[in-house]
Amino acid sequence: MPQKNKKTILSKSTFIKGMQCRKALYLYKNRYFLRDPLSPEQRAKFIRGTHVGIFARELFPGGVDASPKTHFQMAKSVEKTRELIEEGETDIIYEAAFSFDDVVVALDILYRENGKWNGVEVKSSKAISETYHWDAALQYYVINGSGLKLGDFFIAYIDRDFVKEGEIDPRKLFRLESRLEDVKIKHEKVAGLISELKETIALKSSPDVPIGTHCNDPYPCEFMGHCWKKVPPGSVFLLEGIDKGQLFEWYNNKGIKTINNLPEFILQKPEYQKQLESIHSKRPVVDKTRLAGFFPEREKKQLIMETFIFSPAIPLFDGTRPYEILPFGLGWTDFENMQHGFVIIDPGRNPNNETGELLMEITDPYDLIWVFNSSLEKALIDKYARNFPEKNDVLMAFKSKFLDLRQPWDEHFVVFPSMEILKNAEDILTHFERESEKFPKNLEIPQEADALYQQLVLEGNEQKKQEGLASLEIYIQSKLKNLVRLHKLWLDFHSEV
Ligand code: SF4
């Protein structure tokens, strides 16, 4: 393949980026340094996708891998794929790479059947989205354009109804759906889009694209830090409960940038009053009566607890489904003596019933159990009850012990200028500028703890396993300390005069 200016070459990811936002593509190709740092969420997603992709090769075992040593050597990969096809000694190629019209793509699986080559793109999700169709359409366009006429094009994705029993049959775990008609329909559009995107990259300056709902759809944009830095303090985006499309329309087209410029009918609405008060005073607005009702009588024996979960895309235990949420550990703090405790289920054992039993045993002496998002613990109890119907009554009664540390936030007992949806205790603590316990560097978010535990289930090296467990232990303890801090935060608001 002749050497091209790398800047003008598109790939699957830059094509999708350009479809999401022309400015994002321009910045990526011309102002790469403006990118936000890779988030831990993106890192965890990438690891999961790679793992599923490798497993999916078992759909067509025994193939030859054409992937390059690094992403910068795609030209070699294209060359290798061409040679493998010409030599004709293999019927299956993984990461087969093709180049056409200044676009380079790598297809997960290329296989030959009855003399015809077919393509398979693997997705680690349980459904096919519109973005995946475009992704497939681009690949079909490039592969056909490069001279290889495909007989069919499939998307492989995970069957949500699959239940593991013994060794996994990849043909049952994955659904393989032909998308030939869809990709053919999009053929002309793909050609037009490629040419538009190439024009965008060649622009002298960044295209003028205002911020909008597209900044998070279909993926969070990596240039948010750059584009959103001009959003003024007290902006309209702080106000929760108004349709985002409407907010962007006001912000971009009507000059309504801050809360103060909002139409009177919005400013008068009772549901926004507390938030507006908080924005103006720059202080939280506390509903003392409701917050007081949130705390139980002091003499009740109380425990703070968190359940730690993982959800493997490829089921690891018999009787479980893809992405089933499984507990791998529990952490708790006794309110009276502030003693912490934790348990991590030995990786390799199906944790479902074991955690259910431990949960019951640990919490039995307590009247009340504080958790963050009680729906998780309640779901685990429901699952445990399904496995042990004879304990159903006890278990259902047990659910009434839970108190949810998210409640003051979710139900606006405490209102702050920005009431965006916060996912965890750390987010809320940070939001109120309270110090949050730091996690180990490799375990900043629950998805990373999830990925680490999955690794440990498959880990053969005892030392690595112990190291991983030690990191998880620190992670669990830090999480627990943050829950205690969150409880204290609500207490502080309650007792402030
Ligand atoms: S932040 Fe929004 S406007 Fe800016 S490049 Fe990304 S998607 Fe486009």
Image (spheres, helix red, strand yellow):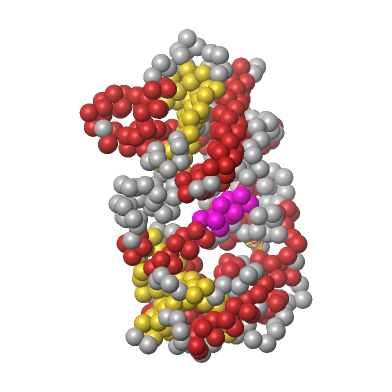
Front-lying residue, 464 or 146: 464
Front-lying residue, 358 or 383: 358
Q: Is residue 455 above or below residue 199?
A: above
Q: Is residue 454 above or below residue 17?
A: above
Front-lying residue, 396 or 308: 308
Residue 91 among those drawn in magenta: no
Query: In the picture, residue 436 is in which quadrant?
Result: top right
Ligand 1 rendered quadrant: bottom right
Front-lying residue, 133 or 19: 133
- x and y, in percent, of residue 43 in the image: 59, 54
Q: Residue drawn 65% across and 69% down? A: 70
User: How many numbered dots are placed on residues in this image?
Assistant: 0
Q: Is residue 370 above or below residue 445?
A: above
Q: Residue drawn 77% across and 76% down? A: 204
Q: Which residues are magenta?
A: 39-49
Quarter of the figure that contains the N terminus: bottom right
Query: In the picture, residue 29 is in which quadrant?
Result: bottom right
Q: Is residue 251 above or below residue 392?
A: below
- Does the image show residue 386? yes
- x and y, in percent, of residue 30 in the image: 74, 70
Quarter of the figure that contains the C terminus: top right
- x and y, in percent, of residue 309 in the image: 46, 40
- x and y, in percent, of residue 164 in the image: 32, 52
Q: Residue drawn 70% across and 84% down? A: 3
